[in-house]
Amino acid sequence: MPSLGLPELIVILVIALVVFGPKKLPEVGRALGSSIKEFKKSAKEITNDIENKEKDS
């Protein structure tokens, strides 16, 4: 998957601004950020569980 450059990020921001509006955008950003944080935390826990089981075997 290619990385996003500045032009792509600007297009995404403009689309988000049009769809959600300027008042809702910070709320949506916080919700997205916390969702990503929870996903990373869960993925790390699963990885740690798998590594611990491999060590026990």
Image (cartoon, rainbow, N blue to C red):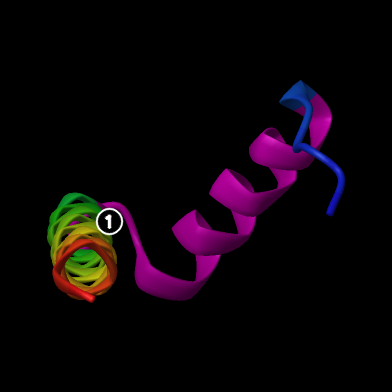
Q: Nearer the viewer, residue 16 or 52?
A: 52
Image check: 36 left or right of 30? right
Instruction: Examine the image and state in which quarter residue 32 appears.
Output: bottom left
Instruction: Examine the image and state in which quarter residue 55 appears.
Output: bottom left
The quarter of the rendered structure image containing the C terminus is: bottom left
Image check: 56 left or right of 32? left
Name the residue rendered at 18%, 55% in the picture: 37
Q: Pinpoint residue 19: horizontal percent, then vertical percent.
A: 49, 73
Reading the image, the residue beneath label 1 is 25
Q: Nearer the viewer, residue 15 or 32?
A: 32
Q: Nearer the viewer, residue 6 or 57?
A: 57
Image check: 41 left or right of 51? left
Query: Is residue 33 found inside the magenta-colored segment of the image?
Result: no
Q: Pinpoint residue 8: horizontal percent, then vertical percent.
A: 78, 40
Q: Magenta region: which residues?
A: 7-25
Task: Reply above or below: 3 against 13.
Answer: above
